[in-house]
Image (cartoon, rainbow, N blue to C red):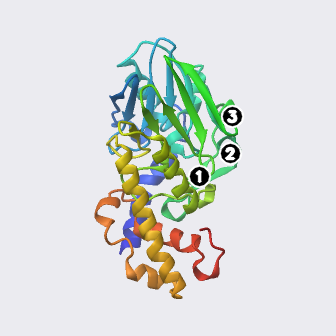
Amino acid sequence: MKVFQRLVLYITTILPLCAATTFSHGQGNFSGVNLSISPVAGNVFMIQRPGGGGNIGVQIGPDGVLLVDSLFAPLSEKLVAAVKEVTDEEIRFLINTHIHIDHVGGNENLAEMGVLIFAHDNTRLRFFEERSRFPRAGGSFVPQQAEAARPLITFNDAMSFHMNGEEVQTFLVPPAHTDGDVFVYFPESDVMHLGDVYRTTSYPIIDTYNGGSLKGTIAAINKAIDIAGAETKIIPGHGLDVVGREELIEFRDMILDIRRQVLRMIVDGKKLEEVMNANPTAAYDAKWTTDPGWGAEDFIPIVYYSLGGSGRLADR
């Protein structure tokens, strides 16, 4: 029954979203979607759509606007309108945190406005694939985007933007959600955008099709914890709430506990079905399964195979 419900979700929700993004300017299924913008700290704001998916970071000031991610293409006009609610300055720069369509779908539209797009080298390489595969629904596909959507400027490790009174730092983290994940840190505002490495709505979505890993997820979250201070505001890739360092620690510790339980069962010779039946996520399901497209049935197998389940090479 659960498999059937997830198939229905995919057909009625995920497929229409993918189809809508094929056309850069069409409103499609997003015509009734409204975006909201709210202050985070300093001169950094967050733009959200209902449900908190694909959260956008916005830095404003006299030097112009810097965006973190671009949502789906049909929402570009609404994205620009949301920015105009808080500033009349032009949007100059866009940083993509990773390759997924709900974070890069608006690239082409913004590029046509003259916005310069930045991303990690690995993220740009993913734009050249004939079609992109994503982990939800057992591996869904999105068509290749237009050439104009590709990041114009890329970096290997880190780069900085000196604008609006602060040095905005963007840097690669270990392969976590994907192999091109970057964090964006606004040190003067004390705000950090973690892309989809961290979300408040589900267990980690580790996209192995695009180079993500369990080991890298833990390392990336640890990096964010090391950088964050007591007052740092964290923008999640998905979720309605801005959080802090303590929530990151809770998220990391949840992953480590599940990892520890699964590893113990692997050592005891348990197969995946037995591990699933043991329900190692039971203590956390109430909090981390609010996203209907990703649950324990998706996360546990990734943990199992990452740790060497069924004789696969361990990624410990």
Q: Secondary structure at mark 2?
A: helix
Residue 105 seen in the figure? no
- Any mark on residue 135, and which? none
Chain-order first, disc 2 or disc 3: 2
Q: Secondary structure at mark 1?
A: loop
Q: Residue furthest bottom?
A: 269
Residue under the point 37% across and 71% down: 281
Q: Which residue is mark 2?
A: 122
Residue under the point 51% across and 72% down: 301
Residue under the point 58% across and 24% down: 161
| Closer-to-camera residue (222/36) | 222
Amino acid under disc 2: Asn
Horizontally, residue 211 falls left or right of residue 217, namely: right
- Any mark on residue 178, and which? 1
Q: Secondary structure at mark 3?
A: strand
Horizontally, residue 133 falls left or right of residue 54, namely: right
| Closer-to-camera residue (228/108) | 228
Chain-order first, disc 2 or disc 1: 2
Q: Are marks 1 and 3 in contact (CB under 8 Å)?
A: no
Location of the N terminus by quadrant is bottom left
Q: Which residue is mark 3?
A: 154
Residue under the point 49% across and 41% down: 227
Chain-order first, disc 1 or disc 3: 3
